[in-house]
Image (cartoon, rainbow, N blue to C red):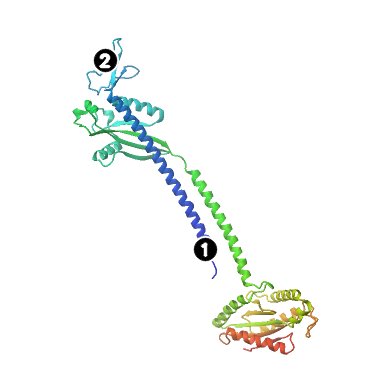
Amino acid sequence: MEIDYKKYLLNATFAWVLVVSASLGWNLFQIQNNKHDELLETARSFFRQTVITWEWNARHGGVYLLVRDGLRPNPYLEDPERDITTTDGQALTKINPAYMTRMISEIVYKDGKVKIHITSLNPLNPDNLPAPWEKRALQLLQKGGQDEYFESRKDGNTTRFRYLAPLVTEESCLICHRKQGYMLGDVRGGISVMVPSRNKSNRPLFVSHLLIACAGVLIIQWFGRRLSLATEILKRQSQVDGLTQAYNRHYFDKTLHKEWLRSRRFKTPLSLVLCDIDHFKLFNDTYGHQAGDECLIRVAHILKDTICRPGDLVARYGGEEFVIVLPETPLESALVVAEKLRANVENLPILHRASPVNRHVTISLGIATTIGNLLSEDDLIAVADRALYQSKQNGRNRATMGQTI
């Protein structure tokens, strides 16, 4: 079974891109989530600080400040002691929790653009009327089920994080708010905090993941090509004879079966040539096995050079025997090829003084041909083998036709 490396490389590349995309998505989610958590904690901190200031003022019944530098008495504070004059003639006005919160919020907004706003669905001061989102938040808080409200709104390159938590009526609050019908524990309003945050560009994150994705794809392709090349080498090594580099017996069997099926299907001639080096044992005994190996290599080389059609095959059949598969070749043409093979081997030349046939190395050949179902694969080989035996019986260094179609 052949492995489709292109398919595997494509799947590996797709999987890598998918992993990098998932990493990018996760990082973007984490950045957004962390930013949300940071803004929420910042808003809560401002709210807690504001409530602490509110409670400090309320517990002390308000504080007095000099009426100067734009500070004016609170017209919504109904208190007979709202305005007093010191013994040295300085005018003081009482600053209640709400007034102090507004004053502090102005400083906070000027320094950091964080907006703090006291609001209520039923405010004493018109400036405390809720914005649409604050009204929606107060209505949700009054229904119960949650103790804070927050949302994010993008405005160009800026994200505005809105937060609102309720103000619960306490004893000190009833001094001003009893007449509105509030009782202890009622939600009389809330304090909203709006925290602006400039949106940072995610381009570096996109670029880095793009580079990682490209690098990974290049590495996968590089390793894939190396693996494919190594596999091709292994495949080639599994198909060829280690000594002669002709195809081996296993590959010959596969090729013969494939070509026999094609011959049976299309009714085309299929020829087989078996050849054997004459008196090769005498050659080994005379010149040694190393020279014998060199002889096999040179014979295999000249056989492969003689067979020039792409579909033809030269394989080492065993020992000093070679086999040639000639698809779509009738018997007469196969004989021509066999004679050419014989002559080219004889003309190499490789000295063989021990041979009784010729002073050079020669080969004997047997030829068989079939069309369709005339001969089975085994019968085709058997006919070629008998023809080879006949060539040897008739003096060697010759080609014999074993089957006439």
Residue 243 in the image: state x and y as whole percent. 69, 72
* Image quadrant in which you'd find residue 67: top left
* Of marks 2 and 1, the one in the foreground: 2
Q: Name the N-terminal-most of marks 2 and 1.
A: 1
Cβ–Cβ under 8 Å for marks 2 and 1: no
Residue under label 2, please give it. Answer: 84
Q: Is residue 160 visible?
A: no
Mark carried by residue 235: none
3D distance between C-alphas at marks 2 and 1: 90 Å
Is there any visible trace of residue 149 in the rendered image?
yes
Circle 2 packing at 10 Å, graded few (<14), some (14-19), many (20+), is some
Q: Which amino acid lies under the numbered mark 2 shown in the image of this protein?
A: Ile
Q: Quadrant location of residue 72?
A: top left
Report x, y in % for residue 230.
61, 63
Lateral position of residue 295 relative to residue 268, left or right: right
Residue at 35% from the left image edge and 26% from the top image edge: 104
Per the image, the residue denoted by label 1 is 7
Pick out the residue farthest to the top: 88
How many marks the image carries: the answer is 2
Residue 285 in the figure: left or right of residue 192 = right
Q: Which image quadrant: the N terminus?
A: bottom right
**Image position of 383 with respect to 7: above or below:** below
Q: Is residue 243 left or right of residue 137?
A: right
Point 28% across, 10% down: residue: 87
Instruction: Give whichever of 156, 346 is nearer the camera.
Output: 346
Q: Give SS at disc 2.
A: strand
- Neighbor class of circle 1 (other Cα within 10 Å; few <14, some 14-19, many 20+) is few
Q: Position of residue 384 (x, y in %)?
A: 65, 85
Check disc 1 and give the amino acid type: Lys
Query: Measured from the top left, where is residue 176 in percent x and y?
Result: 22, 26
Look at the image and tell me in which quarter the C terminus lies. bottom right
SS for callout 1: helix
